[in-house]
Every structure is written in structure tokens, then in C-alpha cells.
Image (spheres, rainbow, N blue to C red):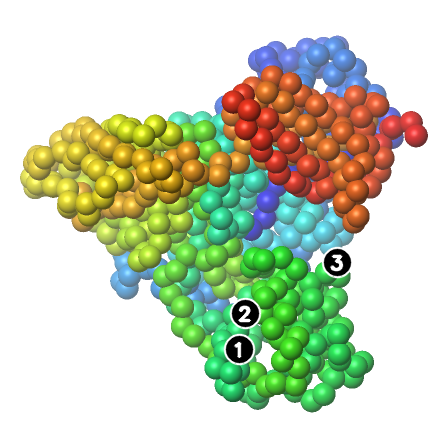
Amino acid sequence: MIWWLLMTLIVQPEQQEQSFIIEVEDNPHEIAEEMETYYPRVEILHIYDTIFNGIAIKADNRTLKKLKNRGLFKQSYPVQKYQALETKETINQSVPFLLPENLPYTGDGVKVGVIDTGIDYTHPDLRKSYKGGYDLVDFDQDPMETTEEQGIPTLHGTHVAGIIAANGEMKGVAPEAELYGYRALGPGGTGTSVQVMAAIEQAVEDKMDIINLSLGNTINGPDWPTSIAVNRATEQGVTVVIANGNTGPDPWTVGSPATADSVIAVGASTPQIEHPYLYDRFLEKKIELWPMQGAPPWALERDLRIAHEDRAKDKLPMDSILIVDRGKQPFTKLAIEAEKRGAKALLIANNEEESFQGAIEAEISIPVAGISKETGEWLKNAHGSYLEIKHEKIQDTVTDFSSRGPVTVNWAIKPEVVAPGASIMSTVPNGYQSLNGTSMAAPHVAGILALLKEAHPDWTPQQLKAALLTTADPLESFLPTEQGAGKVDIGEAINTDTLLYHSFVQLGKSGAILERSSHSMIVENIGDQPISYSFQQPKLSQDLRFHLPSSFTLQPGEKKEIEIEAILQAKQQPEPFLQGYLYLNDHPIPYLYVSEAADVPMAMGLEFYLEPFDGQYHYQLYMVEDAESVTVDLYDDKTFVFKETILQLNDQSKGVVEGSLKKDRIPAKGSYVANITVITTNGEKYQYQTPILIEDTLRQE
């Protein structure tokens, strides 16, 4: 998945003009008029007033300083420039897995906006579907992917667009939908929150029916600016689909803007795929693999002999599979070196106790995969053994990398649904490529919504979302915070006679021994016959009991608000989450209760960035609860020796925290590990660590 970040910015010469998006507090039209009157050298490029207040301008840094000093804006973000990649040809197999045969809808006439890295609209499979868009990086009508002449090339938006509406050799989910590209992410797939919000606004102004955002950050809170922006977009009549994130499988990993209430956040499941693994016949041991994107498939016919880098010589024995430890060298460089030494395949052992994803960004002839740290240690002692390559069919599971909920502060269940996001083939510049991620899952749902919108053109975003969630199928052995309502079912969604609104039962968080909570939802009969409704009785539990409404009947077109009451009897050592599914007839209703035992993150998302107009380092982070104090200490990223304290905040309120560092607190240029310590108002201590890069500084040493 591509993540947008607030980028570290380089101070430009005073007289060099650049394009900026500035965020203002007052009426942007009045401020733009004031700029044109008193600052004739400022060129107004665009005014944003729908989902946030901002102005796109072109100015030099000296003029920008004057505008800032006059208080005409509160933040600026310089526009970056960007570019494309060569890929291997193959065709997406996840679409037919998802759609029933002979579905009479193709997305005809439905407008879908892709807010991403741009779209290669010259691709033969996208020419028919592409109808236009806007570039929020270069401020023009050409949202082409970043090319090599512009910077680090990109392909992500083209891949997303193909899943939605490819219409050529490859067919997307909704091949006759109208595609619009909004380039908000630049070289390497990065951009600013303000560029993303400006792209959302442009898509709303262009009257998109659906917008897809396969992007996000690590802020697990409902009120981050981009989350607010997408909620406002739904208020304007646009259905918003967002990738849930790729930092699973732990809880609290869903990030903004997927944390927003009104959107449809999408997790990644597997279509039917053949997943490779290695097998030691003598020890009857199975070795899990995490294949790297961009490398050839694991299709070798002969068994491979284990060779570990600690013992292997320059030239490897015939039919060797080289095992190396993950370090600072890029995966691509490790793969090229292994190929030169004669390896038939490469395994990279992780340096942490968790799974990881990777990509090979060069043409190589050998398959490459990641393995766990534990497996790497085991293989070191199995030098000279032979491993057999096998494959197993995997279908309808939630991937490990798919981010999980819930959301902090309001304790919302995320994602809403899951869709295929593993080994997805789609369009990229110059061909096709397989990618993994919730970035691939979200456009499957965007395409499905285009089909649903074609079938029901008068439905609102609330009705479209309700239809999708009411008819989803929960995957066996997965919980609401992993899959929401479950796997989308477009056939059922199109033909449903019932819509459930606010059907996720979020019971909140409490540490009380006995807790009562209630949740209201709305049931609507949209069929042409009366429907009787009744709850299936859940399994009895001493921890959580429900008082459910009695059976009732709704006439065609009738709505009814019902209330679900839950009674929690807390244990001395309660589970972090009590969650599962209720069923109204056969419609799933996920529920979640968060206990005091849940390890809720108190702060997240520390970012530093250098403002171009004054050279000052600014910071921002997100606080889940009010804090007595927040301290940020820096440590050397290699030796972990303490360097200095750069930030100390007292009596800090929850939400977005931002400010600038005093000059005597700006650290020297270099890489650090930041340790953030939060002391809550009730005296509890919470810490987390994140890497920090200081690329430039005005500090006097």
C-alpha cells in the first residue's frame, strides 16, 4: 500500500517561484482577493472551500514569508514533481473470483475518481475508461503517473485504476465505468495531507459518484484532518472507499483516513491462489514463505540445497537456495548478488519476530521470499539439507498484512468489509504486474460499488454502504476487527430487499465490573413484500449478554429503529476485546466491546518537517487521551545512546498536537530513534518509538 507522509522539505532560493497549497483559517476567497490586491507577484492557481479551506498559489519564498508574517495562512506544503516502471505481463484473476457469472452490470455511466499517484491513461486497457482528472502536484489537467524524467517513477495509481475499470485485454470489476485520475502523490508515492484533501475536494467538485483512496497513514484516530475531509465528501453525496492499511496483524493498526465514520474501509483477503512453501521431507517440516513482489514465481522443479551466507563461498553449489539475514542492504541488491553467485532462489530471514513484505525492483531470474527470524535460525543448522518446493491453495482468509481495528477514541470497528488483496494482477505503465496490499482490495470494492450504483442510480452513499454491509459474508474464524462484516457479495447487494443502517454494534470502552450499553440501528424493507425479522439467539456467555428486540414485520418501504442492549459482566482479568456477530435473519451484525485490559496506544504518528519559508522544524503527533506530560527523547539509531530531549509538553489535550521546535531544541543532522513518553492524567505511563530523520538544520553547533 502507498502511504502519504508529510515530507521533509528543502529550503529553495529566495527568488525561485514554486507552487504551494496553503491552508487558511478564514474565507479562502477573501484571502485570495487580498493576496491579488497587495501581492501582485502571487499567482492564484485554485481555491478550495468545500471540504477544507485552502489556496493553491505560485510564489517565491520571499513573498511566501511576507504572507506568513502577515498571518494570511497557517501552513504551506510545496508541490513536488514525479515518474514510471517496466513490468511483466499477466492478467488479473481476482475479478472473476469476486463476480457471479452473467452479471448484467458493468458500471456504465458511473464516475469513479482514483486519488493516487496518477493514471497511465495511454495504457491500452485504460484508454476506453479514462475520462479526465486533475494533477494536484503540477496543477494541470494531466494526472499522468510520475515518469523517470520527473523523479522516482510510480505505477500504483494505474494498478488501482485497472482493478476498477480496465477494459481491454484485462477486464476490471466495472469495465464500463468512467475513470478519473487525481494525482495527489508524487515521486515514490508520497505527498502531503493537504494535497490529498485538495484532491478529494476536486473530485467532489467534479461530481464523482465514487472515489477510491488506496493510501493512508498510521494515525489511528477518527478526527485526523483527512478523516474529517472524507466524511465531508460523503455529506456531499460521494461514496468513499479507503484501503484499511498494511501494518497488520496487530490491533489498532488501521490508519487515517480509513478511520473515518462514513467511509467504507477495506481489508485484504485472498482470492483462490497457489501459495508456495518449502518442505523438508526427512524432518517433515513445512517452511512458510512470503514471496517478494517483482520476483519470478516459485516454479522450480528440482529440490534445492540449503546454503547460508555465513558458510557459503563466493560460488554456490549447484541447485542452491541461499539464506541471508535481513539487514540494511536493499532486497533488490541481495537478490542480484545471490543470482550472480549461482543461487537458484533466495530466502531473506527477518530480523524481527514478525512477517514482512518486500519487493524486487530489478529484472532477476530467481524467486525471492522472506522467512521468519525463527525459520532463518533453524535453516542455519540445516546446512546441506534439501528442500522441496510445494504449493497450497489458499482462499477466503484475511491476510496477515491487512491492518486491524478498532479505532481509538470512538472504539469503532474497522474495516467494514474485505476483498481480494493478495497477488493481484493489474495494469501498470508498459504492461501488468502483481501487487499485494489493501491498496488492491479497496479498488475491488470501488468497482463493486460502481456496479451497485448502476443498478440503483438513485441510491445515496448511505444506502450503498448499507447494502454492501447488510449482504456481506463473514469469513470463518475471523473477527469483526479483522474483517468487519466480511467478504463483499455483489449479487446479494444488488438484489437485497433489506438495508441495515448503523449495523456495527460499537459498545464502547469501560472498566466497570457491571456495564450496560445500548446501540440503535435502523432496519428498512426496500422490497415489494412484507418481511418478518427476528434475531438469531447468540451463544450464552457469562461475560456478555444481549437483550434483543422481539420479532417484527415491516411493510414495503417501511423503516424501524431498533435498540440492542448489552450487559457486560467483567472478569477480574477481562479479555481485551469481546466481539463477534449477531444475526438479524441472515444479515451479519458485528459487535465489539473494548475492556480496560486492551493495550490502547496513547500517542502515535510523530512527524517532523522543515517549513520552506522559515527553515523551522515543525512537529505533529496524535494524542488519544489528555496527558499530564508528553516527552520526546532522541537516541542514536545505531548505538541507542541517549542524545537529547527535544520536546516537553505539559497538560496536553487529546487530538492533533502540532507546533515548532525552538532553535536550541533542533537536533543535529542525522538519523535517530525518537522515544515518546506519555504520562496520562491518571498517572499511567505509555511509551512508543519511531525513527526520525533530520536532513537539514539551522541549529548553531
Q: Amino acid at mark 1?
A: Leu
Find numbered disc 1 in the image and state the secondary structure of the residue it sits on: strand
- For the point 85% across and 35% down, the residue is 668
Give the camera-side residue of 673 and 186: 673
Secondary structure category for the residue under label 2: loop
Q: Which residue is mark 1?
A: 278
Distance from disc 1 to disc 2, alpha carbons, whole Å, reads 7 Å
What separation in Å lies between label 1 and label 3 (alpha carbons)?
Answer: 26 Å
Residue labelled with disc 2: 289
**Which residue lies most toward the right here?**
701
| Sequence-wise first label, 1 or 2 | 1
State left or right for residue 162 relative to residue 552: right
Residue 106, given in percent of the width and then of the height, sits at: 35, 54
Label 1 with label 2: CB-CB less than 8 Å: yes
Query: Which image quadrant for residue 634?
Result: top right
Q: Relative to residue 604, is residue 417 drawn left or right?
A: left
Q: Amino acid at mark 2?
A: Leu
For label 3, the residue is 328
* Res. 282 visible in picture: yes
